[in-house]
């Protein structure tokens, strides 16, 4: 497959639950303009190395609810996407290391999550098949020597301790990479061994959850959407979740609770106005979640400000800390976007994966114990790989807007809007 054959969005089959026809019809009708607009954006700002975007399809609305710059589910992608992934990885790595060929892949510290390690092994395989040398260097203090892991897939993964020599990092046997690829979201802060090194680190350390805020991302995303919505002539709200945030909050001591309740009330009023405009009879709700962090921790759904003020001890404890025990001191209050997607009667939401500026695949996060308004990124979730619908790489204009390839094209457009927002975040952080 040549570089020219690498399409921004492949064709996929989807769950196809819920009418998104207004949005999909508009995106299909303006496809040429949309793709030209994306090319213009990438000429102005380079894309992140990789990213994943959680989407929610409410039928009347299709919007991202989270953008992860350290995606950890490559093992959940369909093998049919492998060729796309390898080619996109090659382009992304050539941008980082135009001449050298050695990469150090730095994963999360935890080594007991076998599914996560399968993700690391998949990333390693993609990099190797893209024509680069790659070894996995861990910053876990528990690993001081080589440690080989046997994975459920039958693959083996060699973990080696990262060593620092002056302002460079490498491995004990002298392996010296030209770049460090992080698959560690830095929720616990920047490891001292990586701080201030000479080699390029992607994504940048400044994009880790130790310093990045979701509210900043969604503010940039709103700016991107306003530009895009003007181009395609749609209401920005159809693809943008409203949000608010307030100052410091301590769920244990209840400091900042009044501010949180006021912002929840204000956001519910704003969303209700849009519901009335579009004749939506459902009751609006908000999702309150840690402004930094991932893994579905520090999240709750509320439909009134009173729910914030009446949290029980267990709920306050659950909201007070995030990944690696990080204390939650700031939250984003996001418009709740219910999902109408289902697989085998279970609630589902699409997750789209991108490398460089290309969509390389995705999967459905599925949860049989959660409803359409609940957080699916929680214990008990499973993953269903999206599969190719056919061999084409562009939407079918002759098919209905909600037909299989066209539904995923809509997913890919919204995910790439979030990718542009992330690219602008990176640019701002490096300014």
Image (tube, rainbow, N blue to C red):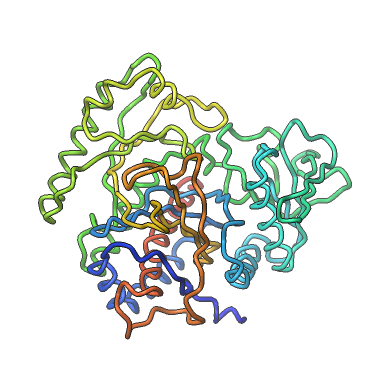
- Residue at x 18% of width, y 47% of height: 282
Q: Which quadrant: the N terminus?
A: bottom right
Residue 199 locus on image (x, y percent): 70, 49
Residue 180 locus on image (x, y percent): 68, 50
When the figure is inspected, residue 51 is found, relative to residue 317, above or below; the finding is below
Q: How many marks?
A: 0
- Residue at x 62% of width, y 48% of height: 183
- Residue at x 24% of width, y 33% of height: 264
- Give the residue at the far right of this rendering: 173
Closer to the camera in the image, 384 or 331: 384
- Residue at x 14% of width, y 49% of height: 281
When the figure is inspected, residue 188 is found, relative to residue 156, above or below; the finding is above
Residue 307 locus on image (x, y percent): 26, 27
When the figure is inspected, residue 99 is found, relative to residue 184, above or below; the finding is below
Closer to the camera in the image, 135 or 247: 135
- Give the residue at the far top of this rendering: 253
Residue 397 locus on image (x, y percent): 33, 83
Residue 27, image quadrant = bottom left
- Residue 321 appears left or right of 173: left
When the figure is inspected, residue 327 is found, relative to residue 64, above or below; the finding is above
- Give the residue at the far front of this rendering: 345
Closer to the camera in the image, 93 or 365: 365
- Residue 62 appears left or right of 269: right
């Amino acid at each position: 497959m040549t570089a020219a054959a690498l399409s921004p969005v492949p064709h996929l089959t989807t769950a196809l639950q819920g009418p998104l026809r207004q949005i999909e019809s508009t995106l299909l009708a303006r496809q040429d303009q949309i793709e030209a607009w994306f090319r213009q954006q990438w000429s102005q700002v380079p894309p992140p190395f990789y990213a994943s975007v959680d989407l929610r399809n409410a039928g009347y609305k299709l919007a991202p609810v989270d953008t992860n710059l350290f995606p950890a589910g490559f093992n959940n992608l369909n093998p049919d996407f492998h060729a796309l992934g390898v080619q996109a990885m090659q382009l992304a790595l050539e941008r980082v290391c135009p001449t050298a060929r050695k990469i150090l892949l730095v994963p999360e510290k935890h080594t007991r999550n076998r599914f996560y390690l399968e993700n690391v092994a998949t990333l390693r395989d993609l990099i190797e098949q893209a024509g680069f040398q790659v070894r996995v260097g861990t910053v876990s203090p528990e690993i001081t020597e080589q440690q080989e892991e046997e994975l459920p897939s039958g693959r083996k993964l060699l973990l080696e301790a990262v060593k620092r020599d002056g302002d460079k990092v490498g491995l004990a046997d002298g392996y010296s990479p030209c770049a460090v690829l992080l698959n560690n979201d830095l929720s616990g802060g920047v490891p001292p061994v990586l701080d201030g090194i000479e080699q390029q680190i992607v994504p940048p350390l400044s994009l880790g959850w130790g310093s990045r805020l979701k509210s900043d991302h969604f503010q940039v995303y709103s700016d991107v959407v306003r530009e895009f919505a003007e181009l395609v002539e749609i209401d920005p709200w159809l693809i943008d979740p409203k949000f608010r945030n307030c100052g410091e909050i301590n769920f244990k001591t209840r400091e900042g609770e009044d501010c949180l309740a006021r912002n929840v009330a204000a956001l519910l009023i704003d969303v209700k106005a849009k519901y009335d405009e579009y004749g939506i009879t459902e009751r609006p709700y908000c999702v309150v979640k840690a402004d930094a962090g991932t893994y579905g921790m520090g999240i709750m759904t509320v439909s009134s400000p009173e729910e914030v003020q009446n949290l029980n001890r267990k709920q306050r404890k659950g909201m007070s800390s995030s990944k690696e025990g990080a204390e939650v001191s700031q939250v984003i209050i996001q418009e709740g976007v219910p999902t109408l997607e289902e697989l085998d009667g279970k609630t589902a939401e699409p997750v789209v994966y991108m490398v460089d500026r290309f969509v390389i695949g995705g999967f459905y996060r599925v949860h049989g114990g959660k409803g359409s308004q609940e957080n699916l990124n929680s214990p008990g979730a499973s993953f269903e790989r999206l599969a190719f619908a056919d061999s084409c790489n562009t939407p079918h204009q002759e098919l209905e807007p909600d037909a299989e390839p066209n539904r995923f094209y809509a997913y890919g457009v919204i995910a790439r809007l979030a990718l542009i927002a992330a690219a602008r975040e990176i640019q701002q952080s490096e300014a």
